[in-house]
């Protein structure tokens, strides 16, 4: 497959299939060949579903030949994170302890992707239990821009496969930053929708009240198309929101003129690497140039809510692992095992205190949006580090300082590439919106993308 094809946007790939320029079967076969060629070095896929993918592609071609188009994803090869159930397919959530687990049902997100005719290439590698580190027995995915650098966590395989042209889009999950970190590190677009906008049914949990599911793509329009397929109420997940799902793709062209973007200079620069701070400032200036109004704001006090992420996540993770922890504690890696041990040792008062801090922050943050439409902020306080310098990230609280507050609040966020370091690795930032205002975030992201060149660059593989 030529570079022109495997680095196409999802939307453009769908148009070529619908227009008969290439068949879904041809594109899927070419993508499977690329996976076979590169996955041995990138380690993005844990399971490749070659036979079923080709069958789905053949079905898509037959439907299109009959004039039965299902929309922009019809026939396009994508992939999902390996905590999303596919009936009869190993779904191990990055955990060797679950290596034989084969669900008897599909996750709702898988059902919905298939309903719009997407072709599922396989399951993508991830950290153990979607927490902070890969299990010692698993080979970490490799950043396609530079193998010496962090690929992000926990949706590491999703970031690597999407950036490296091993799928046209993927799904990730975000509990403390796990869509935004690999999107930042791999130079892709990552959309964390409002909590409850996308069903969690059939998705192995890390923390039920913090987990979000969303698309990881190379272009903002692709994220819009994916969210349009995924969003909406689901009877199997009573926490899903019943609000109508708009046509996100159709709304992209609105631009940012007149949109008020809140910027807290102290929040964005305190203890932040100057290269990161400058990149975010430059991105904000691009949006200003596109017609957005930049409004000074003050983010509510956030140190306490960042600190409250760990007790909430740890306590809720214990519930998800009740069948295997502590009964098989010795089979866990040290990082995931440490989280579960911390959760077991928490008191009810610890969890209550963290929950109260969380609710107070959420209320304060919601009031900010009375005067603004979007918040612009970094995603990480430091440059994505070299693998041999991971200690530069500091504590977990330092890592999740810019991401976890918006998991607590359930706010939609979009991660966008905004440059490259001197070593050629990507830079990025995030926009945060009101609940259910993904359409506005996608509009703003699309306006930024049109005004910059960052999405036009791809790893040389």
Image: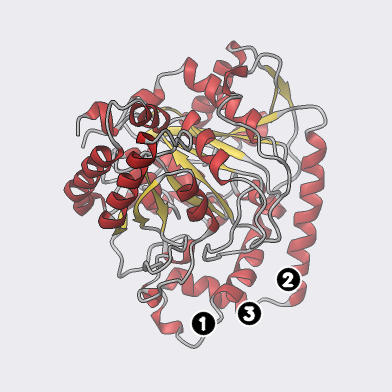
**Protein image colouring:** secondary structure
Q: For residue 383, say whether it is visible.
A: no
Q: Earlier in the sequence, mark 3 or mark 1?
A: 1
Left or right position of 371 against 248: right
Q: Is residue 182 left or right of residue 356?
A: left
Residue 345 is marked as 3
The span from disc 3 to disc 2 (Cα, nearest Å) is 10 Å
Position in image of residue 152 (x %, y %): 42, 49
Image: 206 above or below 319: above
- Report the residue that reaches farthest toward the left: 37
Q: Nearer the viewer, residue 162 or 395?
A: 162
Q: Residues within 10 Å of mark 1 (few under 14, many from 20)?
A: some
Labels 2 and 1: the sequence-earlier one? 1
- Residue position for label 1: 325
Please, what secondary structure does the residue beneath circle 2 have? helix
Q: Is residue 202 visible?
A: yes
**Would you name the residue on which mark 2 appears?**
350
Q: How many neighbours does mark 2 have within 10 angstroms: few (below 14), some (14-19), or many (20 or more)?
A: some
Q: Please name which of the two marks, 3 or 1, marks the residue nearer to the observer.
A: 1
For discs 2 and 1, the disc positioned in front in the rendered view? 1
| Cα gap from disc 2 to disc 1, whole angstroms | 20 Å
What quarter of the picture does the C terminus occupy? top left
Few, some or many residues within 10 Å of mark 3 (<14, 14–19, 20+): few
Residue 320: give x, y in percent of width and height.
57, 73
């Amino acid at each position: 497959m030529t570079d022109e094809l495997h680095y196409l946007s999802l939307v453009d790939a769908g148009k070529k299939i619908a227009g008969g320029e290439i068949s879904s079967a041809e594109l899927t076969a070419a993508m499977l060949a690329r996976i076979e060629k590169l996955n041995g070095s990138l380690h993005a896929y844990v399971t490749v579903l070659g036979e079923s993918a080709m069958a789905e592609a053949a079905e898509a071609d037959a439907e299109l030949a009959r004039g039965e188009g299902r929309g922009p994803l019809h026939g396009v090869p994508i992939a999902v994170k390996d905590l999303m159930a596919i009936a009869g397919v190993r779904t191990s959530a990055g955990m060797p302890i679950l290596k034989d687990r084969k669900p008897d049902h599909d996750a709702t997100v898988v059902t919905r992707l298939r309903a719009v005719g997407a072709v599922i290439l396989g399951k993508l590698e991830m950290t153990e239990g979607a927490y902070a580190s890969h299990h010692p027995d698993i080979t970490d995915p490799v950043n396609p821009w530079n193998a010496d650098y962090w690929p992000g966590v926990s949706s590491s395989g999703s970031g690597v496969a999407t950036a490296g042209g091993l799928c046209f889009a993927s799904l990730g999950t975000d509990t403390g930053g796990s869509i935004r970190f690999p999107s930042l590190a791999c130079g892709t677009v990552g959309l964390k929708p409002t909590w409850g906008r996308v069903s969690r049914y059939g998705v192995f949990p890390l923390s039920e009240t913090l987990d979000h599911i969303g698309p990881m793509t190379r272009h903002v329009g692709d994220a819009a198309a994916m969210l349009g397929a995924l969003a909406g109420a689901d009877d199997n997940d009573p926490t899903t929101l019943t609000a109508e799902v708009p046509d996100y793709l159709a709304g992209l062209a609105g631009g940012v003129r007149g949109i008020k973007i809140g910027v807290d200079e102290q929040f964005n620069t305190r203890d932040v690497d100057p290269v990161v701070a400058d990149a975010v400032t430059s991105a904000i200036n691009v949006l200003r140039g596109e017609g957005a109004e930049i409004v000074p704001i003050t983010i509510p006090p956030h140190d306490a809510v960042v600190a409250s992420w760990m007790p909430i996540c740890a306590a809720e993770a214990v519930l998800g692992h009740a069948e295997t922890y502590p009964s098989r504690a010795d089979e866990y890696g040290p990082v995931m095992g440490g989280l579960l041990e911390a959760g077991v040792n928490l008191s009810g008062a610890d969890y209550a205190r963290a929950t109260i801090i969380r609710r107070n922050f959420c209320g304060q943050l919601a009031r900010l949006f009375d005067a603004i439409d979007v918040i612009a902020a970094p995603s990480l306080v430091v440059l994505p580090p070299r693998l041999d310098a991971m200690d530069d990230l500091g504590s977990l609280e330092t890592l999740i300082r810019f991401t976890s507050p918006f998991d607590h609040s359930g706010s939609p966020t979009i991660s966008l590439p905004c440059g490259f370091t001197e070593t050629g690795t990507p830079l990025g930032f995030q926009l945060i919106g009101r609940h259910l205002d993904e359409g506005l975030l996608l509009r703003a992201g699309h306006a930024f993308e049109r005004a910059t060149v960052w999405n036009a660059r791809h790893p040389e593989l």
